[in-house]
Image (tube, rainbow, N blue to C red):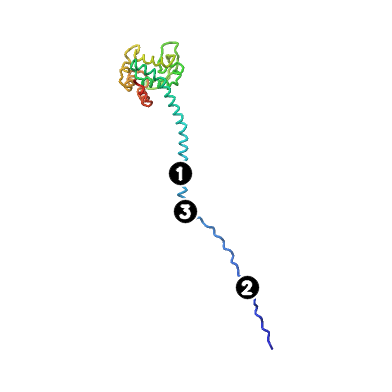
Amino acid sequence: MIGTKKKRSTKKTRQIKKRRPAAKRKSKKVAFRWPDLILAILLITLVSVQMIKWLDHHAQETPKVEQTSQTKSRQAFIKQLVPSAQKQQRQYHVFASITLAQASLESDWGTSELSQKYHNLFGIKSSDPNSPLLTTKEYVNGQWITVKARFAAYNNYDESISAHTQLFVSGTGWDSGHYQAVINAENYQEAARALQSKGYATDPDYAQKLIDLIKEYHLDQYDL
């Protein structure tokens, strides 16, 4: 009796692989790098420095333009007075540099009311009751005070410079040789100090201001 053999299944038993649950992805931490931080700081510093330089340069541009304009204006003022100043030096030995420095200082470079309206460059006063009455500052008892005084009026700057020289030549009503030291000076420094010592101006720093102006604007180049 032929027994029936059990047929082996040709199908391989499929092994069911159990999938493991997906592991949670760990977030990658960015590693801290000192070189990157230092580089960033250097870049920020460099940009800041350049910005400060630009701002500083921009802030200085306007004053430079103004200063250049002012310098040109002052030089033009000086040049228009040079012929008259040199003329007085030829005739009376009053240094042209002294005349120019005084005119610049006293008239604020030709911008004062007295110089613009009345061509009075040196603040020369007048006893004429019909002469202009203006306010001025004087140094009295160790302090500056504002006073009113009458001043001479001229038709032009040439007349003003001539009158200024004649004050040195003729002196004051009480001393005809009062300013002789100014005329006899051998250089502008000596002339400036003579003006100070003879009380030409009440400003205690008057002589030094004249000397500084002459040096700064090279006014001695016009001395003969």
120 with respect to 224 (left or right): right
Snapshot quadrant of residue 145: top left
Q: Amino acid at mark 2?
A: Arg
Separation of disc 1 and disc 3 at Cα?
A: 21 Å
Q: Viewed as shown, does residue 87 lie left or right of 44?
A: left
Q: Nearer the viewer, residue 119 or 127?
A: 119
In the picture of the structure, the residue carrying the numbered disc 1 is: 46
Left or right side of 201 for 36:
right
Find residue 31 and report its horizontal and vertical position in percent.
Answer: 49, 55
Question: At label 1, which amino acid type do we have?
Answer: Leu
Asked if the residue at tag 1 contacts the one at tag 2, i.e. Cβ–Cβ closer than 8 Å, the answer is no
Residue 101: image quadrant is top left
175 lies left or right of 2: left
Regarding residue 108, the answer to whether it shows in the image is no
Residue 69 at x, y = what percent?
45, 27
Residue indicated by mark 3: 33
